[in-house]
Image (spheres, helix red, strand yellow):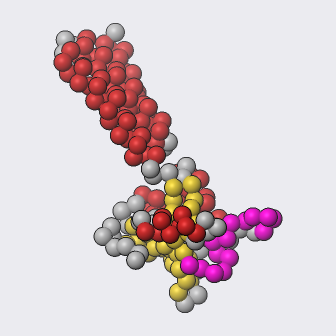
Amino acid sequence: MDTLLLLIVAFIAIAIVAQTDLFQMVILYSIFSLLCATLYVIYMAPDVALAEAAIGSAFVPMIFIVAISKQREFIVLSRLEDGFLRPGKDGSRSGRGYVILSSLCRQYGLKLVLCPSEDEKACRILARSSPDVYVYEQEGEYIMEGKGSSIIMERLSHMLIDHEDISLVLTGDEENYD
């Protein structure tokens, strides 16, 4: 029985690494911890099993879920007046920047929040926090500026390869957009 549990634990560990949905990853992590706790009981370590069950399958996943739920929005701050970031509403065509950023958000399961927008008050609050991308135009070229440490920015750089008039500037984490 313990061999079967070890194989299941190994399979779940691989599934955790391969998972792209963060919520499913947390669920798999919790299952992994419960199975490890079961193995600890089988190997006569009930004190370790109790700690693993309490911390590994309950407390840590709760912290992960709280952190993930706060990271569900992708905030884009811009003062562009042209249609580059225009969402295609009422039959109008979406701007190129909007299409690129919404495609990026779809891949990561994020909600695209453009500031400024119709909800100007919410945008002022969000703009004070750290936006994910700041978009501006300089000498006929659109510049998307974001944190270099972000995995999402790496994916965005790959998406922008075919767009010669759009550049991505990666900044350090200590820089801000004030």
In the image, is residue 28 above or below residue 104?
A: above
Q: Is residue 56 left or right of residue 130?
A: left
Of residues 71 and 124, which is closer to you in this image? 124
**Is residue 99 rendered to the left or right of residue 40?**
right
Q: Image check: 14 left or right of 53?
A: right
Secondary structure character of the magenta stretch overall: loop
Question: In x, y percent, where is residue 165?
Answer: 58, 80
Residue at the spot x=51%, y=63% of the render?
A: 75
Q: Is residue 80 magenta?
A: yes
At 42% across and 40% down in the image, what residue appears?
65
Answer whether residue 18 is visible to the viewer in this image: no
Which quadrant of the rendered structure holds the N terminus? top left
Q: How many marks?
A: 0
Q: Residue furthest top?
A: 1
* In the foreground, 55 or 150: 55
- Residue 119: where, in percent of width, then height? 61, 65
Please tell me which residue lies in front, 23 or 115. 115
Task: Give the magenta range.
Answer: 79-92
Measuring 68% from the left and 66% from the top, which residue is drawn there? Answer: 87
Does the magenta-highlighted stretch encompass residue 176?
no
